[in-house]
């Protein structure tokens, strides 16, 4: 059994990861770490885990020592030293935070107000979006697990840009996320009576996932591109739906667009391209590692609309982290990820 | 125009009260007070109020000075000095907190861990449940606005106990409240992802509204009685529904029970007794000052079930406070309280 | 008192309208009509209305006969004959359905599969968006109350197009609506367990409000324009939020954009332009007739984002209908529309 | 692999069962039946199942023929003939409907207005509540899967009645259920805008689960008892919480009560007795087969409150059916039931 350790296990991503790893056939959770709750059982923080994971939260360094694979689920800025420690100890490190996602230090400075402490680690870090970078992940020792919005968006339109079927400029991304995306710490914004029966965009054109999205889409397009990205807070627990507005290049018809998806995602376990006439819905991926994508072509105006949905906590965080671990360790990619979406 | 001042105007009860007073034909809001937000506009805290009430939050003492009627919407323990100041200044004081609700200092000590600082004020304080104590309210200068649960429960079964139609012992009250009842300060319990799609009882048999309920019901029964009271947190914003389990006394039939309600509440504007076959529902009183009550008699077991619903923020707090003010000032009782329940 | 009659009073728009008219100082509801529920009290369908409006539903022709002002809240296709009957009887008719919104019969045929039965009525029909067509409404006897999405969108960007400050092509409108927008008739889509905790776009680029939006925006731009419009179903009861993506014309800065709004909406009672740094939120307009609008300029990409929010049942339906009636009858425009948004 | 067939697979219980069986290591789904949707793929009705279960719905008789184990998820009255057909064909039959739950035909007539068509089948039917009737289930060929409320209630207080620790009379059960309990067919009651932000009791003292609850509790008490049972509709998708009010017999203290639970449920996989001070919450069992139970003793009044929670679709329906199948077939009882509750 692979020894897995989770740092930041009491946050939402960390807890979901611990939950998934608890049923993973090839791993055992050897350590859960939490600064805030050190000394407490995980099941005291999440009573749903009573009898399932009653491990006591320990320090980060103890987690590293006890584990073969280390996951960190921390606010940005806190993972670089952990990555270094894992690297020194020769352990596989998967970071669910933002520290290793951007390859451009400038962008990291601008958007996160931080710097690259160990540039050589950043060079070896692999962006863990398996459907796009699977080969690199196979060889990786340090994996930057993508953000939730970037996962939904990149999976949603990467094939179109890669094949050069759409105009790379003026892409508009209107994204909506459930409240777990805001994390476990209470705030006025996430206080039930202010969040329930409400709906609001936030960080309009200023969200930190913007450069990450642009990085992957630029990689696809083969040129630097800029997007307009507006996230909104949905009064539901889980899920991200991104509605993406593009223009097909002259002469590209719906069939060509659809084929790009089908060939690019051929054989993929976790990406489902919907049939013409179907619309991707957040409810069909909840609690699962699926990404559902639907295409909509407006003959009247020539506009192309892509809808991409994931569970932000699974494919957008913990599930994808497990998928990355599976790939990096040579396990079957779907191990521990057989969850069927909740139907209701 | 009557000069109304609201202390604690940025909490939920205070804000709802300010909202109601803003459309009251006989009052003008002359001052809103807030310790936390002193110097800020109320509409900065509640942007819904932009252009409607842009008053700047000031200190408590300034509120008292500027107002003819002072409302306080504060955690328990903070209203006694304000009551004293209002009394000294000859102003009508309506307390939406708990400090003056209990007449028995012992009970106040036990449940609230406080003491009566100005016993003479407590003697003159009137419990502001208009349908039961209207005559006293008319003469009052210090009104203790009832708690939300006690309002729903007392209105729900007072007539039965008053008429001696039901056994006063072993009354079970299973109550459910929307999350605004927990106030505006965020907490883990009220964090959207933990509150949404969830449902939990809390403070089982230990809720501070217990002695207040017992006080009013004992008053009705003419003897001290004890109840079993279990509140639950509903994943909705507003409303309280109390399901109350009683036993009719031997020989009392449904007709007699129903008549007790109809005569007791005859002519009441804000209490609606439902017809046989109808069931009180929280959705029919939202945003209004109504209390809907339905009776259900189980011929098979002899049990009597009463369902009583209010909007916890209106009849359970701000609306009732306005009703009390109207009575104490000799205005028509329904002034400023013509809100029709939201239909959906 | 003006005699008001509501046809289709048991649907959501009709019921909300009846609710608003019940507290309107200058009207009395003389008749409510319903085919499905003829002979039943409105308060049997909406028990929230017990004791407030217990009128019995009668036939459409009886409603017309008994009223000075007739409102129809019906599916499209059913209002033309009613309009004719009102016209013959010389009564003011306000249609909350879609039959008279489009001036172009071709568009009506294409999108609604219907035809103009009385072309002369269509010529005299006025599009009832008061902030834009107030002068025409003043003289009108037949008012087409706008759709909910078109209201939010048109108010949101009309000034920019009118002043020629933005590119009229390639406008993208990503709109989200609460479930009351789908009406009162149950369906699989609106069945609680399938709608709750879910989120889905629908009728992508095919929604019937598209030509209505284009009609008003074309009127503003002075040329025919086409938009990309994607509505989504939000798991909340009320409200519409439209996120609108545009490009300012070369050389137009944020200040110019903002001034366009401020001068266009100067003195308007129901439109609130938010300050820089503020974001329009659905929760700040619920239960009220307000439209809140915020502007967001992305210096990095040059994109302009406008957020426009209304309560779909009030400013998007019943409230606007009352506003139109007030204007057409020469009453103060805000009569009966003083509702403050619910704070929570 | 065991061949499993599900009749009524497109209803909520049937679909959840199909979902669980899709990941059960020892079964394959050989047939799904649906009258309404015969000829359609299950994944057309539940797009969440795309690529997971794309089986086409067939007729009931075909399902029986193709399967070793037959599950029926049908409204009451429709299972008796299916049971007969399974019995004739020698197949294990597990009925998720109500036809075989009551042993007393009189009660079935009174509450369900039906009759026992094959009395000998009723005699051999076993009530499938594993924690109480495991030995009988092991030998059964016809299993009546319990109702959702009866499961939560019986597990909640069976040990207390069995040991004679509480008064068997005047037990009050205030239960609350998520909306999936009302099934998949839309209705006014479950229409999102009428169900959301609302809360209402229903079928007060008249719910069909009443005799089923009384049957099991009477079995525990060794005498016929009657209960007061009031269900409520919670605006959430899944879960049942029952708040149960009892009186301990004279001289019975909290310790004795707690021990009764701990010894009765010793070694049980799916029942978790909470520690003193903890409160059972619906959110801790969602999506899992657990039943969490907490005890609360009121020293002030002597009242005993028990809180019992399950996921109505899992332990209250499909999960328990799988558990019953496992037992009847001699598989490890937890096979296919390793789901960890969703944390949020």
Image (tube, coloured by chain):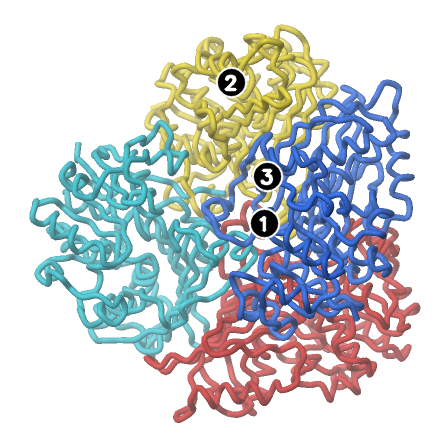
Chain colours: A blue, B cyan, C yellow, D red
**Image marks 2 and 3: residues in contact by CB distance under 8 Å:** no
Q: Quadrant of residue A272?
A: top right
Residue at label 3? Answer: A112
**Residue A284 shows in the view:** no
Neighbourhood count class around disc 1 (C-alpha, 10 Å): few under 14, some 14–19, many 20 upward? some
Q: Are marks 2 and 1 in contact (CB under 8 Å)?
A: no
Using the rendered image, report if marks 2 and 1 lie on a common chain. no
Q: Between tags 2 and 3, which lies in front?
A: 3
The chain identifier of the residue carrying mark 1 reads A
Write down the residue under mark 1.
A75
Instruction: Give the residue displayed 15% in from the left and 53% down from the top.
Output: B81
Q: Position of residue A167 (x, y in %)?
A: 79, 23
In this picture, residue D204 sits left or right of residue D53: left
In whole angstroms, how far apart are the C-alphas of marks 2 and 3?
Answer: 45 Å
Report, in whole angstroms, how far the alpha carbon at label 1 lies from the one at label 3: 11 Å
Measuring from the top left, give residue D299's x and y in whole percent. 35, 81
**Callout 2 crowding tier (Cα within 10 Å): few <14, some 14–19, many ≥20:** many
- Point out the residue furthest to the top here: C222
Q: Position of residue A222 (x, y in %)?
A: 82, 28
Chain of the residue displaying label 3? A
Element carrying mark 2: loop
Residue in the picture at 32% in, 38% down? B19
Q: Is residue C72 left or right of residue B115?
A: right
Q: CA distance from mark 2 to mark 1?
A: 48 Å
List the residue tagged with mark 2. Answer: C129
Give B201 or C191, whichever is nearer the viewer. Answer: B201
From the viewer's side, name the closer residue of B232 and C23.
Answer: B232
The secondary structure type at the circle numbered 3 is: helix
Which quarter of the picture shows residue D61?
Answer: bottom right
């Amino acid at each position: 059994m692979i020894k897995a350790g989770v740092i930041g296990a009491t946050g939402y991503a960390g807890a979901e990861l611990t939950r998934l790893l608890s049923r993973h056939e090839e791993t055992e959770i050897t350590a859960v770490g939490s600064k805030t709750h050190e000394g407490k059982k995980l099941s005291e923080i999440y009573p749903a885990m009573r009898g399932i994971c009653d491990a006591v939260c320990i320090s980060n360094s103890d987690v590293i020592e006890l584990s073969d694979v280390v996951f960190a689920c921390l606010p940005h800025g806190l993972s670089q030293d952990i990555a270094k420690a894992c690297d020194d100890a020769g352990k596989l490190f998967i970071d669910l935070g933002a520290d290793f996602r951007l390859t451009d230090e400038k962008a990291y400075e601008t958007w996160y107000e931080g710097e690259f402490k160990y540039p050589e680690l950043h060079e070896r870090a692999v962006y863990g979006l398996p459907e796009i970078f699977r080969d690199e992940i196979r060889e990786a020792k340090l994996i930057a697990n993508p953000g939730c919005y970037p996962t939904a968006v990149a999976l949603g339109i990467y094939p179109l840009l890669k094949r050069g079927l759409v105009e790379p400029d003026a892409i508009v991304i209107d994204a909506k996320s459930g409240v777990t995306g805001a994390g476990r710490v209470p705030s006025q914004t996430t206080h039930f009576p202010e969040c329930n029966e409400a709906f609001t965009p936030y960080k309009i054109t200023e969200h930190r996932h913007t450069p990450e999205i642009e990085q992957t889409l630029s990689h696809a397009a083969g040129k630097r591109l800029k997007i307009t990205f507006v996230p909104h807070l949905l009064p539901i627990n889980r899920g991200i739906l991104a509605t993406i507005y593009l223009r097909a290049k002259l002469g590209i018809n719906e069939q060509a667009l659809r084929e790009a998806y089908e060939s690019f995602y051929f054989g993929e376990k976790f990406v489902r391209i919907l049939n013409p006439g179907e619309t991707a819905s957040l409810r069909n991926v909840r609690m699962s590692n699926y990404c559902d994508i639907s295409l909509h072509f407006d003959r009247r105006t020539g506009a192309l609309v892509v809808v991409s949905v994931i569970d932000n906590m699974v494919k957008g965080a913990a599930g994808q982290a497990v998928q990355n671990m599976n790939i990096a360790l040579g396990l079957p990619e779907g191990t521990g990820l057989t969850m069927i979406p909740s139907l209701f």
